[in-house]
Image (cartoon, rainbow, N blue to C red):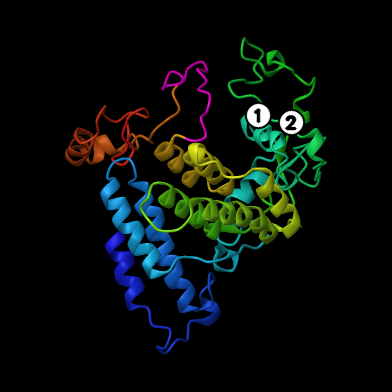
């Protein structure tokens, strides 16, 4: 994949005849932005190898920087959507959050508490408290002061893990925050494929590790600010001053650099669940509390991979056995993929 990205980026020619224009939903045929995308994606893949192959991670990170990565939120790779209620045009995540299961989720206590404790200006654009979450026209109240995350490991089945038995139970499950319905929980919410904020934070980590030139603090500050301002591309209205105030209030500390960078990456990839999960497995940050909820196949451990589909063993047995033999621990959710070493 890395070699293919390098090859594609080098072959892209801004001076060549180009009739793509609006058929390109990401960049309207802007070749220079596509080159930045290729090298930024190269950086993401390179950093994915930071645990398993630091030498290759360093090498490809350098190539990405030399090629030219994203430089601002104007370079963000965003897929636009329309609110028409069908998967091909609607945001699939927004469609579920807004229409399919508007009352089927709550934001986590871990996430909400972190944002509240750091006075994060993104909180009101991530969360809202709706009186009737099942009614997607109830936009709720996004006042940061009333946002409340639901603790993990509880249900509403009336047993020992019933949510009413959780510490600080607010008396009504609807007092727990759902995702803001004017930004992410809507059918026409944009999908962030790859962003400058992610890129800058990965550059901060590469610099912190001594793999590229530049100051980790500078990359970090740019990444955090970009991650805040990029919410304006979802409909938020966060000012440059608010973003600067947050960055200045939480200065970069080299001794805690990897934790700070990857915790901010956790926030910056909100609604890009797979990327958030992958980077957590790679970096170990933020440090999350494991919950041993009844009946879980991982016995309280946070999953490290997805298992193969059940039918794979029966319709493709030979290849399945060969693949599983290469996985330390076998085909289990607690086993680790090749780049996720102990």
**Depicted 23 relative to depicted 59: above or below:** below
Instruction: Please tell me how crowded label 1 is: few (under 14), some (14-19), or many (20+) other residues with Cα within 10 Å.
Output: some
Instruction: Give the total number of marks visible in the rendering.
Output: 2
**Depicted 110 relative to depicted 198: above or below:** above
Instruction: Please tell me how crowded label 2 is: few (under 14), some (14-19), or many (20+) other residues with Cα within 10 Å.
Output: many
Give left or right: position of 132 versus 317: right
Lower sequence index among marks 2 and 1: 1
Q: Main secondary structure of the magenta part?
A: loop
SS for dot 1: helix
Residues in magenta, as a range:
285-300
Q: Residue at x 31, y 37 (%)?
A: 311
Q: Can you tell which quarter of the image residue 128 is in?
A: top right
Q: Residue at x 48, y 55 (%)?
A: 215
Q: Is residue 226 magenta?
A: no
Spatial separation of the CA atoms under disc 2 and disc 1: 7 Å
| Quadrant position of the C terminus in the picture | top left
Q: Is residue 87 visible?
A: no
Residue 282 position within the rendered picture, expressed as x and y whole percent measured from the top left: 40, 40
Q: Nearer the viewer, residue 333 or 200?
A: 200
Q: Residue at x 45, y 65 (%)?
A: 69
Give left or right: position of 31 versus 76: left
SS for dot 2: loop
| Residue matched to label 2 | 148
Q: Can you tell which quarter of the image residue 102 is in?
A: top right
Residue 143 position within the rendered picture, expressed as x and y whole percent measured from the top left: 82, 41
Check contact, mark 2 vs mark 1: CB within 8 A: yes
| Quadrant position of the N terminus in the picture | bottom left
Residue 123 position within the rendered picture, expressed as x and y whole percent measured from the top left: 72, 43
Residue 194 position within the rendered picture, expressed as x and y whole percent measured from the top left: 50, 58
Q: Is residue 333 visible?
A: yes
| Residue matched to label 1 | 109
Q: Nearer the viewer, residue 110 or 243?
A: 243
């Amino acid at each position: 994949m890395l070699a293919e990205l390098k090859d594609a980026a080098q072959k892209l020619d801004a001076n060549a005849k180009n009739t793509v224009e609006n058929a390109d939903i990401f960049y309207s045929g802007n070749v220079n932005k596509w080159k930045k995308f290729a090298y930024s994606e190269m950086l993401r893949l390179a950093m994915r190898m930071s645990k398993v192959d630091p030498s290759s991670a360093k090498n490809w990170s350098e190539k990405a920087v030399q090629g030219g990565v994203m430089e601002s939120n104007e370079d963000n790779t965003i897929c636009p959507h329309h609110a028409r209620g069908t998967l091909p045009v609607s945001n699939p995540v927004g469609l579920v959050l807004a229409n399919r299961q508007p009352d089927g989720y709550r934001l986590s206590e871990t996430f909400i508490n972190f944002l509240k404790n750091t006075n994060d200006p993104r909180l009101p654009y991530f969360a809202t408290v709706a009186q009737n979450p099942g009614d997607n026209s109830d936009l709720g109240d996004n006042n940061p002061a009333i946002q409340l995350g639901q603790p993990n490991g509880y249900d509403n089945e009336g047993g020992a893990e019933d949510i009413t038995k959780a510490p600080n139970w607010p008396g009504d499950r609807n007092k727990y925050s759902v995702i803001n319905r004017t930004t992410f929980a809507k059918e026409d919410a944009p999908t962030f494929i790859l962003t400058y904020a992610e890129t800058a934070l990965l550059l901060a980590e590469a610099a912190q590790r001594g793999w590229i030139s530049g100051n980790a603090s500078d990359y970090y500050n740019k990444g955090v600010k970009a991650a805040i301002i990029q919410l304006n591309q979802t409909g938020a209205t966060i000012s440059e001053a608010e973003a600067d105030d947050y960055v200045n209030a939480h200065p970069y500390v080299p001794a805690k650099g990897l934790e700070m960078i990857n915790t901010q990456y956790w926030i910056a990839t909100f609604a890009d669940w797979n990327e958030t999960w992958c980077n957590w497995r790679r970096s170990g940050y933020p440090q999350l509390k494991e919950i041993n909820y009844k009946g879980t196949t991982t016995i309280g451990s946070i999953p490290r991979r997805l298992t193969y589909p059940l039918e794979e063993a029966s319709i493709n047995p030979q290849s399945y056995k060969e693949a599983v033999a290469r996985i330390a621990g076998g085909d289990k959710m607690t086993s680790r993929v090749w780049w996720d070493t102990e």
